[in-house]
Image (tube, grey):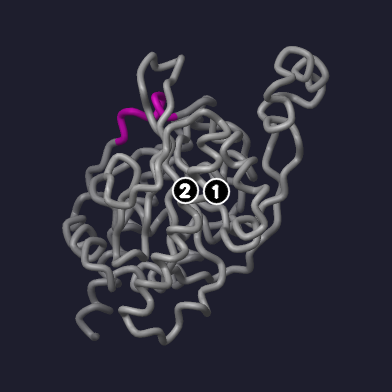
Amino acid sequence: MIRKILFHLMQDKDFSQNYVFKGGTCLTKCYFGYYRFSEDMDFTYLNQEEFIRKPKNKLRGLMSDKINKLGGLIEAVSKKLDLDFKMEKENERYFQFGGSNAFVTFKIWYNSNELEKETFVKIQVNHIEKLIYPIKELNIGFIVPRNLEKDFYFMASEDAETLLKPVKIKAYDLKEILIEKVRAILTRRGIKTRDFIDVYFIIKFLKKDISDYKKEIIEKTLFMLKYEKYLINLLKKQDSFKSLKLEDKENVLLKPINKKDFDNFMRDFCPFLENILERIKISLKKE
């Protein structure tokens, strides 16, 4: 379902030029293949210069216009795919807002044959963001092996184009995703196993130590703490990583993971998170 929605969104010139793919689904689609379940799509608005030095009321109106335009596109795509999304900003079934329109979540509903119930795909957009690394242009990965493409065209000709046609997309650098994943761990309400798994896979791929990105993690996290909910969540994380155990890894993963290697990673990563927390709190006191 995600691939179909993404394919149709990318046919829109404004969307393809101005929104940058990021997050866990970007990892599975553009970098690592299908190593874990992911039902969200995350994007950042690319042209951050549009929002610089704007008065609050004008800034909110500008972002509201962008939400209207993107919501209209999502509604059109949903109709084409026989999904349920309505451009009703006051309706919490379809919209969630944060940071005076800086963050918006669109919910696209559909009936899942696998789950045998109605569920939704989330499209989450950050209008305001600090980008550290250059944006890449990458291919969205295929969902079937290339040697089976002809068979797939024959069996599913109706969906073959949207599922197999190569799609170029603007996407985060892997290091940018890493930094935002660590920030999410620090500022998200509660703990999500998928964040730790994503960081593990990225660090393994980059063959780097997480401490190499300490400065960037602190910088990007401090940027987001001007929004109160993230500051509150971060302050509640004190000591939460010291005895952290992730019990549901197998429920998240589509591929087996080296348990010993992951445990070793966690043994180093959790103290690193505690150290980052302390550094951020010191920085906040200085402000």
The answer to the question of whether label 1 and label 2 lie on touching residues, with beta carbons closer than 8 A, is: yes
Q: Is residue 115 above or below residue 6?
A: above
Residue drawn at (51%, 64%), measured in percent from left and top? 45
Q: Nearer the viewer, residue 194 or 69?
A: 69
User: Left or right of 271: which side holds 133?
Assistant: right
**To which residue does mark 2 refer?**
199
Residue 260: image location, x then y, percent = 45, 32
Q: What amino acid is found at the position of numbered circle 1 in the picture?
A: Ile
Residue 8: image location, x then y, percent = 63, 41
For residue 161: magenta? no
User: Left or right of 247: which side holds 85?
Assistant: right
Residue drawn at (63%, 64%), measured in percent from left and top? 135
Quarter of the image holding residue 218? bottom left
Q: Secondary structure at mark 1?
A: helix
Q: How far is mark 1 from mark 2, CA to CA?
A: 5 Å
Q: Quadrant of the C terminus?
A: bottom left
Q: Which residues are magenta?
A: 246-252
Q: Nearer the viewer, residue 183 or 213?
A: 183
The 10 Å Cα crowd at callout 2, few under 14, some 14 to 19, many 20 or more, is: many
Q: For residue 202, which numbered disc appears in the image?
A: 1
Residue 101: image location, x then y, percent = 34, 64
The 10 Å Cα crowd at callout 1, few under 14, some 14 to 19, many 20 or more, is: many
Residue drawn at (79%, 26%), measured in percent from left and top? 146
Q: What amino acid is found at the position of numbered circle 2 in the picture?
A: Val
Q: Secondary structure at mark 2?
A: helix
Q: Is residue 93 above or below residue 286?
A: above
User: Left or right of 271: which side holds 180?
Assistant: right
